[in-house]
């Protein structure tokens, strides 16, 4: 910690929102020995604070035990940044409007993530990991010498409290000495779940973008969490069901004439789709599946498929088998980056006979009826390229579940380049409606997803 204090003392610029942000970005967390400076919370359910320095600007080390969060609070007359040293922290943002407190955004910050806290922000910080603590460094200007006067919001009672000089954190307390005043029923809370009650999935950015291994672990946990309900929720959601059925029928119709004896199904999930496509094609080829979710892999095997639990994009072991055809459905966009997408298709090419067909679908970045345009807007507005993102990357979770997953949205020229570089020749491309005109063949990538048939060269 001496290294950080020295670095702060050497700060010669005028403290502005911009100059403070540049300073925080220059910190090498590997040089910060923070373990002995961690304070435990004063009481269960709170977080522990240790003020490192208040010269020039405040630097405070905060320990967030598993599952602990602040109250919603209003920064007024100061600005700052939060640097995550360990674990992960969610930043949930709110705005006041017509006596309502509206929750409108939630971002996740992981190790090395830098969270901006502009003057006027209303937010709460939450360690939603129920097993691991989070450790963060907070930088504020001017220094927070006292919490006196800070407004905090109780989402359960919808009361507003003004903290007194006795308050030790931005956390609601039953101790009346912590408040100068309390306004009962001071607002109406509008949650993101309420605003998005008609949506099945919600986007949540992660800063910085996690590495490939972390993303694949995330995806595995996401599908493990849903494994037992997946066939009954995702397959029966009307627009998704119509899209999936249309894709399956198009592939099955094409496979009727393929004479395939052995078929490779990447991201086979519970095996339901692979079996259905085979039945529709009136064929009797063997299906070999690969699946990242252990729970789904077990379900697929229980249905009689030979399925391998494997992280296809990152693991390089080759069984030596060669296949007559392959499918990679509803999943290629889960691969973490262009580097691993190239690697994955090269690997897939090596498993196929010459001229073997590959059927693969992609979510379209330009589909006005899906998340693609929002992903583009979010990429531009948040400068996500500076955080390791590629255009088209999103993280999301399903409403009612806890785990996040990753998905990449594609443009046609991006897909064609991938196929060319990995030894595939495009046979045909069809655009299939998803959220709008689900299951219908539409005119362009602006209206639906891509279904592609490619042949190994």
Image (tube, rainbow, N blue to C red):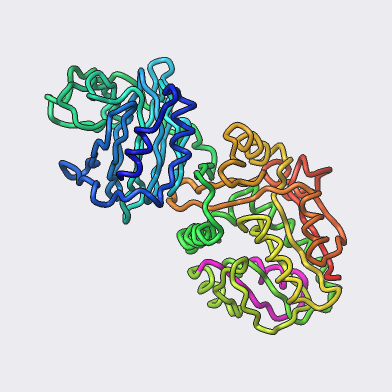
Q: Is residue 450 visible?
A: yes
Q: Is 44 or 62 nearer to us in this picture?
A: 62
Percent of width and height locating residue 169? 23, 32
Q: Is 237 or 222 nearer to us in this picture?
A: 222
Q: In this rendering, would 147 be left or right of 335? A: left
The answer to if 282 sits in the magenta stretch is: yes
Q: Is 277 or 447 nearer to us in this picture?
A: 447
Q: Which span of residues is magenta-colored?
A: 272-293
Above or below, 401 against 265 in this view is above
Picture residue at 70% right of the left edge, 71% below the top = 347
Above or below, 190 against 312 in this view is above
Q: Quadrant of the N terminus?
A: top left
The answer to if 109 sits in the magenta stretch is: no
Q: Is residue 284 visible?
A: no
Picture residue at 86% right of the left edge, 58% below the top = 428
Picture quadrant where residue 7 is located: top left
Q: Quadrant of the C terminus?
A: bottom right
Picture quadrant where residue 95 is located: top left
Q: Which residue is situated farthest in the top direction here?
A: 98
């Amino acid at each position: 910690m001496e290294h950080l204090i020295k670095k702060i003392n050497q700060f010669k610029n005028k403290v502005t929102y911009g100059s403070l942000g540049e300073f925080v970005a220059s910190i090498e967390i590997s040089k910060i020995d923070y373990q002995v400076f961690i304070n435990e919370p004063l009481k269960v359910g709170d977080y522990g604070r240790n003020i490192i320095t208040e010269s020039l600007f405040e630097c405070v080390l905060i320990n967030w035990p598993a599952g602990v969060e602040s109250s919603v609070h209003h920064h007024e007359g100061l600005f700052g940044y939060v640097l995550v040293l360990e674990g992960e922290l969610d930043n949930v943002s709110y705005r006041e409007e017509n006596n309502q407190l509206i929750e409108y955004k939630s971002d996740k910050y992981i190790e090395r993530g830098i969270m901006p806290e502009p003057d006027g922000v209303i937010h709460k910080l939450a360690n939603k990991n129920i097993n691991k603590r989070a450790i963060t460094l907070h930088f504020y200007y001017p220094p927070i010498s006292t919490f006196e006067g800070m407004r905090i919001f109780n989402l359960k009672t919808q009361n507003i409290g003004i903290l007194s000089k006795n308050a030790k954190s931005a956390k609601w307390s039953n101790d009346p000495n912590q408040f100068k005043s309390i306004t009962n029923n001071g607002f109406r809370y509008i949650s993101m779940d309420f605003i998005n009650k008609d949506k099945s999935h919600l986007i949540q950015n992660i800063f910085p973008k996690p590495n490939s291994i972390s993303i694949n672990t995330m995806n595995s946990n996401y599908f493990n969490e849903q494994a037992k309900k997946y066939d009954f929720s995702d397959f029966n959601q009307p627009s998704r069901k119509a899209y999936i059925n249309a894709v399956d029928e198009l592939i099955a119709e094409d496979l009727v004439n393929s004479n395939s004896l052995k078929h490779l199904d990447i991201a086979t999930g519970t095996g339901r789709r692979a079996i259905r496509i085979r039945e529709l094609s009136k064929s009797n080829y063997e299906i070999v599946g690969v699946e990242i979710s252990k729970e789904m892999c077990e379900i697929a095997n229980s249905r009689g498929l030979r399925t391998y639990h494997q992280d296809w994009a990152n693991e390089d072991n080759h069984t030596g088998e060669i296949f007559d055809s392959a499918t990679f459905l509803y999943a290629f966009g889960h691969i973490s980056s262009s580097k691993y997408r190239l690697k994955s298709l090269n690997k897939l090419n090596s498993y196929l006979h010459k001229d073997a067909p590959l059927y693969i679908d992609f979510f379209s970045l330009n589909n006005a009826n899906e998340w693609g345009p929002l992903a583009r807007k979010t990429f531009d507005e948040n400068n996500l390229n500076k955080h390791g993102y590629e255009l088209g990357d999103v993280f999301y979770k399903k409403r009612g579940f806890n785990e996040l997953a990753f998905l990449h949205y594609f443009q046609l020229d991006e897909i064609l380049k991938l196929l060319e570089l990995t030894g595939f020749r495009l046979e045909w491309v069809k655009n299939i409606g998803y959220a709008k005109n689900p299951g219908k063949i539409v005119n362009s990538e602006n209206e639906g997803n891509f279904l592609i048939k490619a042949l190994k060269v």
